[in-house]
Image: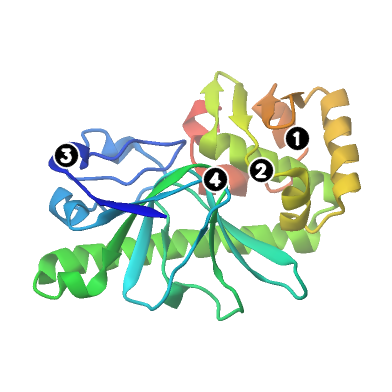
């Protein structure tokens, strides 16, 4: 895990999917969804950019460090007995992670599913800057609320949906978050392996493969190789997801698909 001090030329953070880290100099920040408090450019420059390679596990200790995802996709995971790890929540650009926001589970931490950049900010570094500390705490609190809402929706899917709508909801979420929307069609990468997706959705890997095949046969999706999916029609895929409205509301881009 490599770190580097941010330079002024890198203080504007790019949008990824429907989430971003908004700064005061972002002219379109009011149009972006989900909405979050802004982080001042000065505050961003007080952080350190941490680069994580795909499949790299981040070593995080103590509660003074807060990580803000700049780009990429990470997953919070924990030990689930033996050598198995349980995938808990997905972290997209704009999300935050710190040990005091994580559940007290053995081996809790972040794993990069793609090459990712994060900004590491130490709370103690803001002790002499009360206004920046206030704004940062506001951003962290709002991000934590969004993560909580998404985690609650994920639990509701696992508890109440049959396996097929679960898979469709996951593809819809990933498409909205990381895909490229063109009218009613979206193309997106699948950075998680088949076994990882099955684990995240509490499914058997073979069951997942059969469901993906059925979704392709019904014209909802198409696959390119093992790591890319094309949602041929978001509206068609939404018909497979009873909680489509909640998924779109939490993951943005509803205005792009006529919601």
The front one of 190 and 17 is: 190
Secondary structure under tag 3 reads loop
Mark nearest the camera among 4 and 1 is: 4
Residue 100 point in image, percent of width and height: 43, 77
* Mark toward the start of the polypeptide (4 vs 3): 3
* Mark toward the start of the polypeptide (1 vs 3): 3
The front one of 101 and 235 is: 101
- Indicate the quadrant where residue 111 lies: bottom right
As displayed, is residue 114 above or below residue 67? above
Q: In the rendered image, which residue does mark 3 sit on? A: 25
The front one of 131 and 250 is: 131
Residue occupying the point 31% across, 60% down: 120
Mark nearest the camera among 3 and 2 is: 3
Residue occupying the point 16% across, 70% down: 126
- Indicate the quadrant where residue 234 lies: top right
Q: In the rendered image, which residue does mark 2 sit on? A: 244
Q: In the rendered image, which residue does mark 1 sit on? A: 239
Residue occupying the point 33% across, 36% down: 14
What is the spatial separation of the Cα atoms under label 4 and label 1, in whole angstroms?
33 Å
Q: Which mark is residue 54?
A: 4
Secondary structure under tag 2 reads helix
What is the spatial separation of the Cα atoms under label 4 and label 3, in whole angstroms?
30 Å
Q: Quick one: label 3, few (<14), some, or many (20+) residues within 10 Å?
A: few
Q: Which mark is residue 43?
A: none
What color scheme is it? rainbow
* Mark toward the start of the polypeptide (4 vs 1): 4
Q: Quick one: label 1, few (<14), some, or many (20+) residues within 10 Å?
A: few
Residue 109 point in image, percent of width and height: 53, 67
Q: Is residue 69 left or right of residue 37?
A: right
């Amino acid at each position: 895990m490599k770190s580097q001090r941010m330079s002024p030329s890198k203080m504007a953070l790019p949008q990824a999917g429907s989430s971003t880290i908004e700064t005061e100099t972002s002219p379109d920040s009011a149009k972006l969804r989900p909405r979050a408090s802004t982080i001042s450019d000065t505050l961003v420059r007080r952080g350190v950019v941490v680069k994580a390679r795909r499949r790299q596990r981040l070593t995080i200790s103590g509660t003074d460090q807060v990580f803000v995802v700049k780009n990429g996709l990470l997953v919070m995971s924990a030990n689930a007995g033996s050598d198995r790890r349980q995938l808990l929540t997905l972290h997209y650009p704009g999300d935050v992670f710190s040990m005091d926001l994580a559940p007290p589970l053995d081996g809790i931490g972040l794993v990069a599913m793609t090459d990712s950049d994060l900004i590491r900010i130490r709370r103690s570094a803001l002790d002499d800057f009360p206004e920046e500390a206030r704004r940062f705490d506001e951003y962290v609190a709002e991000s934590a609320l969004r993560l909580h809402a998404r985690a609650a929706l994920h639990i509701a899917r696992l508890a109440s949906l049959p396996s097929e709508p679960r898979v469709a909801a996951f593809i819809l979420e990933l498409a909205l978050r990381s895909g490229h929307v063109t009218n009613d069609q979206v193309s997106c990468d699948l950075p998680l392996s088949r076994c990882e997706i099955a684990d995240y959705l509490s499914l058997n890997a073979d069951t997942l493969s059969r469901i993906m095949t059925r979704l392709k046969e019904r014209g909802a999706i198409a696959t390119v190789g093992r790591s890319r999916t094309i949602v041929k029609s978001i509206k068609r895929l939404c018909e497979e997801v009873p909680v489509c409205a909640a998924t779109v509301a939490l993951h943005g881009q509803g205005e792009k698909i006529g919601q």
